[in-house]
């Protein structure tokens, strides 16, 4: 009896995991397609602000 119960439990876990993964894949795909469509419509504006900003994580560049 425990063998059958284990098989049923495994089947239910796999079914639930498959459903959840399907939902996640659909959401990711929709967001990706939306971003690609948006990027194709018009170019993004250039960032405003100082162009001499230095992006660095070196210890000597970090202000305390």
Image (cartoon, grey):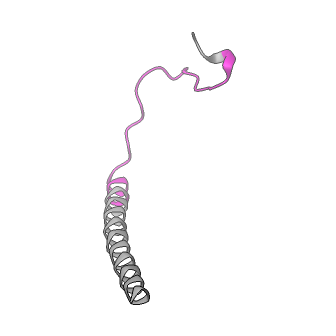
Q: Quadrant of the C terminus?
A: top right
- In the current view of this chain or complex, which residue is farthest to the front? 1
- Camera-side residue of 21 and 2: 2
Q: Residue furthest top?
A: 64
| Location of residue 24 with respect to 5 vertically, above or below | above
Q: Tell me if residue 43 is in the magenta stretch.
A: yes
Start-end of magenta stretch = 36-60
Q: Residue 14: where, in percent of width, then height?
A: 39, 78
The image quarter containing residue 23 is bottom left
Q: Eyeballing the image, is 12 above or below 52?
A: below
Q: Decide whether residue 57 is among the magenta residues.
A: yes
Query: Which percent across, then down, holds residue 24?
Result: 35, 65
Q: Which residue corresponds to the image point at 62% horizontal and 26% vertical from the top-left?
A: 57
* Above or below 62: residue 43: below
The residue that appears at 31% across and 63% down in the rendered structure is: 27
Residue 58 position in % (x across, y down): 67, 23
């Amino acid at each position: 009896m425990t063998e059958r119960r284990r098989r049923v439990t495994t089947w239910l876990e796999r079914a639930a995991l498959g459903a959840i993964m399907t939902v996640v894949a659909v959401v990711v795909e929709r967001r990706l397609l939306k971003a690609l469509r948006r990027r194709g419509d018009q170019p993004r504006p250039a960032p405003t602000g100082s162009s001499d900003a230095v992006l660095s994580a070196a210890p000597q560049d970090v202000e305390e």
